[in-house]
Image: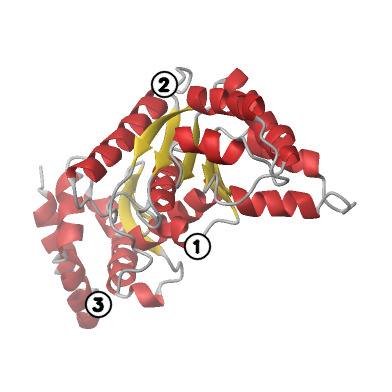
Amino acid sequence: MQSLSDAIKEVMSADDFDPKYRELMAEVYNDADVKKFIQVNEKSLSKEALVRGEAKLYEFFTQKKNPDDSFAPGYVPALVMNGKWIDVTYQPSQKLSAQRNSMQRGKLVHSISMPKFVQAASFASFDMQDVQRAESISEALNFIEGYTSDSDQYQPGFYLYGNFGVGKTYLLGAIANELATHGVASTMVHFPSLAVELKNSINDKNVDTGKMVDAIKKSPILMIDDIGADAMSSWIRDDILGVILEYRMQAELPTFFSSNFSMKKLEEEHLAVNQKGDIEQLKAKRIMERIRFLAKEVTLTGENRRTRA
């Protein structure tokens, strides 16, 4: 039985071949990827298939060699067997795949008044300058592993507590972006901004406040950023935050928080005092019961990166 290498030599030495064409095809047959394809498919390739497939081999070679002139920008050629014949298929390049993945992740992470840097937040870029920060990353990764392997098993989120600028919001962004790579949707909300937006929308007929709150409370993963940063009205605390947290507690939906207050201080120094200065300890305690069910307190230490030169 004639070997494929002998068949190639026979085809290339045929008298009816133009010398320039023979020279071109010699370069094609010497290409490493073409050689590998022929070697892998040697048993199923016949001399006839080789002759009929030379146009495809040439197409693959030229498209691979000149990707900028490709008729399918962003795609790279690949040789395949289509039955017993040689064919070329086009697959997304690594760059195009990365762009698509980034876009898909962007669609899964819904941000409301969040800083732009959360879009690119990642664990790889998180500064782990001490053991405690490394432990926070470990906690976050354990949550992601547990949630993505069994989302039906309830797992509380985190209440990230720490000083200004230590990276609480960044860490929430890294968690959301990593979850998005597993197809998990999340909503990130800067709570003080949301409170202002909701207050301003009360008399705006074009804004459906109930629909907005409904979408937030039902998000598979919710991240409430900077809770406690501004004074909170009784309406925002009880009818907005309270409603959101009650729903998520009953539905057992993981919820994350970030704050400059510890849980204890959030209750005593923020939630218990409304904008009028009235003390409402019982209502504050009700909110905190929900927060403690939904999230475990995780302290994040570090220097203030907002003031670092």
Q: Label 3 belongs to which residue?
A: 21
Q: Nearer the viewer, residue 97 or 268?
A: 268
Amino acid marked by disc 1:
Lys
Label 1 Cα crowd, 10 Å radius (few <14 / some 14-19 / many 20+): few
What is the distance, in whole Å, between disc 3 and disc 1 at their CAs? 55 Å
Q: Earlier in the sequence, mark 2 or mark 3?
A: 3
- Check disc 1 and report its element: helix, strand or loop: helix
- In the rendering, which numbered label is found on residue 150? 2
Residue under the image location 66 percent in, 45 percent down: 232
Amino acid marked by disc 3:
Tyr
- Judge depth for marks 3 and 1 and give the one in front: 1
Q: Tell me if label 2 and label 1 are in contact, CB under 8 Å.
A: no
Amino acid marked by disc 2:
Asp
> What x and y, as percent, mark residue 298?
36, 35
- Judge depth for marks 2 and 3 and give the one in front: 2
Residue 124 higher or lower than 222, as above or below: below
What is the distance, in whole Å, between disc 2 and disc 1 at their CAs? 31 Å
Q: Label 1 belongs to which residue?
A: 116
Q: Is residue 185 visible?
A: no
